Image (spheres, rainbow, N blue to C red):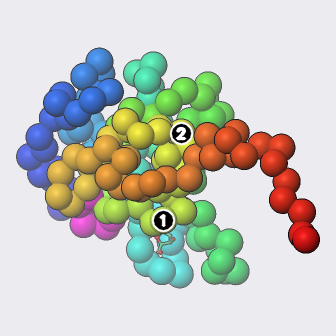
């Protein structure tokens, strides 16, 4: 049985997203397809994710596990790799799903990946609706933190 997307509210009222026509149904379909391609023999927890890029591309990824468990790559890692390898750009909207086809919240590390490549206005389909990254990763660490303190080295007294 193919998991069906839930009815989504569109993100047109969220700042930063109004300029983009986000087809959440298409993102869901792609994420489910990638979930079915996942290599997850150890956890048996396949994940798929799809993201809309600001130039209209759709990038996607699935988790890829390893006999050395800690080496596992999350689905979002694959998606970000796809993003960068196919021309870069900014993620506008992201849909991540688990085996049931329902929205899956990215792990902490992957929220950081989404922040780097989507920033505060990137939208994520969550189990409670569409949320901006500012809600998904509040008070995020980003490159501006590096810039702000660049060159200020505190030496031990
Ligand atoms: N996983 C992802 O692919 N993305 C996440 O955001 C959460 C976890 C994968 C990693 C591992 O292969 C499996 O789910 C179980 O943790």
Occupied quadrant, residue 19? top left
Q: Nearer the viewer, residue 26 or 22?
A: 22
Q: Quadrant of the N terminus?
A: bottom left
Report the number of discs. 2
The residue located at (63%, 35%) in the rendering is: 84
Residue 57 drawn above or below residue 50: above
Q: Which residues are magenta?
A: 98-103
146 relative position to 82: left or right: right
**Could you tell whether 9 is left or right of 146 in the image?**
left
| Location of residue 44 with respect to 94 vertically, above or below | below
Whether residue 100 is in magenta: the answer is yes
Magenta stretch: includes residue 118: no
Q: Secondary structure at mark 2?
A: helix
For marks 2 and 1, give the CA distance. 15 Å
Image disc number at residue 108: 1
95 relative to 98, above or below: above
Residue sitting nearer the eye, 39 or 13: 13
Does the rendering let one see residue 125?
Answer: yes
Q: Specify the label residue 1 is tagged with.
A: none
Q: Please state the horizontal and vertical placement of residue 129, each as a whole percent of the image.
A: 18, 51
Name the residue that disc number 2 marks: 117
């Amino acid at each position: 049985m193919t998991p069906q997307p839930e009815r989504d509210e569109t993100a047109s009222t969220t700042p930063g997203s109004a300029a983009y026509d986000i087809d959440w149904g298409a993102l869901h379909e792609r994420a489910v397809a990638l979930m079915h391609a996942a290599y997850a023999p150890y956890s048996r927890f396949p994940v798929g994710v799809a993201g809309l890029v600001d130039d209209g591309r759709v990038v996607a990824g699935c988790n890829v596990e390893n006999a050395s468990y800690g080496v596992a790559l999350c689905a979002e890692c694959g998606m970000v790799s796809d993003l960068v390898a196919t021309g870069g750009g900014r993620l506008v909207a992201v849909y991540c799903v688990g085996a049931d086809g329902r929205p899956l919240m990215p792990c902490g590390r992957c929220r950081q990946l989404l922040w780097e490549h989507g920033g505060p206005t990137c939208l994520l389909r969550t189990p409670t609706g569409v949320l901006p990254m500012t809600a998904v990763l509040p008070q995020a660490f980003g490159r501006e933190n590096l810039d702000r303190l660049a060159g200020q080295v505190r030496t031990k007294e």
